[in-house]
Image: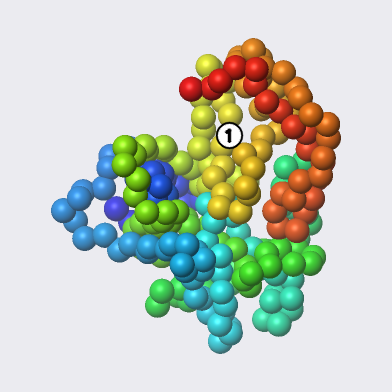
Amino acid sequence: MKRGSTMQQGFRVQVVAMTLALLASGCATTTNPSAPVNETVLDANSQYLVQAEARGRSLKLKVDPGAPYFVLLNDKVAKELRLVGTKAATLAVGPMRLKGSTRSEKLTIGGVTASKPVMWVKGQAIGDADGVINPANLPGDRVTLRLQAPQPGEQIIELPMRFDRQRGLYHEFDYGGQLILTRFTLEDRLTTATGAAASVIAKRRTGLWEGGPFVHQVRFGSRGPSAGWSSVRHCR
């Protein structure tokens, strides 16, 4: 099934043998396995980079499920492309807010040219590429990010996903009646949570706050205060 053109779309995340696959689907049914699928496959050797082109300039974009709704470009790249923002926007990174400029810009990816929402903030958003793009903004039916070779005993887990302007790609995790919005990213080594979400988890698992405050590199060049948290029980 082709991706729709609406702002909010239905997605399905399929984890198979440490493979993160983002399946575009506008409904609850699974993709017909016999139908041809236009798939983009990226692994660690590719560094999850895709080639793109804007205004005749070649771009390297890092594919990350934790990327925002906008294709986020480094400020330097936006200046080289002579992009002029049509609207101001705010990018939420944890408790921090980054002010930036946005516009609709034509990008060519995989031979397909389409207008994409583009955003840039002051400074360098990502160090090893010209920008970062959400898999939901790539052309085709499916994007597969292979994290490592298949391991014995692994199984398929499918999670319904949503994609919108405010949150990007996210999963609505129902934790005992409490809805926790969850994002997946390849950039963060730590599993992080807001204080509110951590508090809910700690209470339900008879947990406690442990450790002093520290500064953790979140993403997009922003750093923020954090705190260590661990549960007194094993979570299975």
Residue 46 horizontal/vertical position (percent): 47, 69
Residue at position x 26%, y 60% in the image: 37
- 192 and 40: which one is in front? 192
In this view, 167 is above or below 204: below
Which color scheme did the rendering employ for the protein? rainbow
Whether 27 is drawn above or below 22: the answer is: above
- Helix, strand or loop at mark 1: strand
Q: Position of residue 127 (x, y in %)?
A: 68, 67
Q: Is residue 148 left or right of residue 226?
A: left
**Left or right side of 94 for 67:** left
Q: Is residue 221 visible?
A: yes
Identity of the residue furthest to the front in this view: 152
Q: Residue at x 40, y 77 (%)?
A: 111
Asked which quadrant contains residue 86, the reply is bottom right
Q: Position of residue 150 (x, y in %)?
A: 34, 49
Q: Residue 2: give x, y in percent of width and height.
A: 33, 56
From the viewer's perspective, is 224 left or right of 30? right
Q: Residue at x 60, y 17 (%)?
A: 233
Question: How many labels, in total?
Answer: 1
Image height check: is 76 above or below 165? Answer: below
For badge 1, the amino acid type reads: Leu
Which residue does the numbered mark 1 point to in the structure image?
181
* Residue name at image x 51 percent, y 29 percent: 173
Task: For residue 24, say whether it is visible.
Answer: no
In terms of image quadrants, where is residue 62? bottom right
Residue sitting nearer the eye, 84 or 34: 34
CA neighbours of label 1 inside 10 A, class few (<14), some (14 to 19), many (20+): some
Q: Residue furthest bottom?
A: 56
